[in-house]
Image (cartoon, helix red, strand yellow):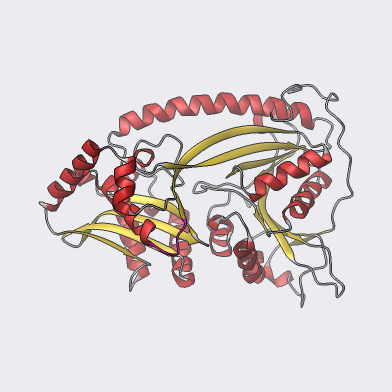
Amino acid sequence: MTGLGKYPLWPGIAKKQPRVAGPSVEVLSHAARYLHGRPPSADVIVLQSADAVTPFRAEIDALAASCADRNTQFESITLGAAMDHLQKKDEARVALLWSEPDGTGRRLMIGLVPYFASRGSYGSPFAIWHVWEHIHSFISTPLLRAGYEQQAVRRFLAFAAAQGAALVEFPMFEAGGAFDKALRDVMAADGILHRETDRHERAFLRSELDEEAYLAANIRKKKRKEFNRLWNRLAEEGRLEFAVHDGGSDVGAWVDSFLTLEARGWKGKRGTAMKMRANERAYFEEICRGAYKAGTLHCTELTLDGNPVAMLTSFRSGRGVFTFKIAFDERYARYSPGTLLMLKAIGVFLRDDKVDWVDSCAVPGHPMIDHIWAERRTMSSMLVTTPHPFSVPLAGWIALAKRGEATARKKLRVLYDRLQGDGNEQAD
């Protein structure tokens, strides 16, 4: 049940939500305004630029490390790079959520939610707040300090309501995770209604099996033989090698090689490769260099006579890994190099004593990864109502519109995958 199933479109029928006093707010437009020897004395600090994020980087990463839900995209390196290079008309803001002050007046950062406000979405004249997503987003779970999840959720919802939000949209978060549980508990306790607008599963890797046992358990013997045949055929073309590293001795060379390989394929032909878009290239270079310095960059590649034929860029976060981008040389497409690389990566991840799980970050029903990684992570998106008088009918209308949009997109995706052929490309 979504909480709005009985009354999807009509105002005034659902239980009236109590209005709460808005939290105190301080806005920082840039780092120069951070003139405090301690966190600003407000419940919510709003950061309006990547520069304004800078003084809080250490605290943001400490917050990220404390969270039960991992999200590398909201860690300081990636968040700052996204705000610097991927914003549209300065749309994104970052809400830093703070605890109540202790006896000395000190506050603890308990949450972080990047967001933007929109008007006109699906014909709505009212402000709708969305957790911020961009072209390279693959997860949008807010960062919430363990043990403070409900307090952080309440603070953000009260902040949004006080600022006039008619709805708050939380897209693409892990269903069943700490944020999901805290949000549902707060909504149940406070009489807040919601609509789940999407729920899907994506390929996930988590197993106690070793590589050989995992492949035997999850891939048919005939298919395994076919992959071995493709590997041997590709090896006939030259010296075929598989490597895993953290960026190597020259991370800049890895990044440039990856961008070049991606641009050589169909994305380059369409003009959508990161190398061909200055802002996206800068974003990718910055997050890779930052992750390399932090020790969280994870690289795997297949090379033929020293030249890359498939490359995978991933990022560690706690005891998890998020696979981000894969590129392959389409001249060797008949050997399925992307699939061979992902098969080899299974053993790498399963043997890594620092890794408990790997999120493919792929679209549901991906034609390649879904057939070789057996586990699934469930993702959810949700519209949450506020005390705004039109919040309930607006949630019903937008949920209905999103459902129709998702159905159309699914049909287009099926057609797209058929046109693409062998499905080596990892979903973005």
- Where residue 99 appears, x then y in whole percent? 79, 62
The image shows residue 117, relative to residue 109, as above or below, that is: above
Q: Residue at the location (60% across, 29% down)?
A: 402
- Position of 196 compared to 16: left or right? left
**Would you say residue 272 is visible in this rendering?**
yes
- Where residue 237 appears, x then y in whole percent? 11, 52
Magenta portion: prevailing SS class: loop
Quadrant location, the N terminus: top right
- Where residue 104 appears, x then y in whole percent? 85, 75
Quadrant location, the C terminus: top left
Question: Could you say which is closer to the camera, residue 28 or residue 178?
Answer: 178
- The boundaries of the magenta stretch are 352-356
**Would you say residue 47 is visible in this rendering?**
no
Q: Residue furthest left?
A: 236
Residue 353 in the magenta stretch? The answer is yes
Residue 414 in the magenta stretch? The answer is no
Question: Could you say which is closer to the camera, residue 148 or residue 315?
Answer: 148
- Position of 1 compared to 347: left or right? right
Question: Could you say which is closer to the camera, residue 16 or residue 290?
Answer: 16
Q: Residue at the location (64% across, 60% down)?
A: 49
Q: Residue at the location (43% across, 47% down)?
A: 360
Q: Quadrant of residue 423?
A: top left
The image shows residue 382, relative to residue 352, as above or below, that is: above
- Where residue 390 appears, x then y in whole percent? 80, 30
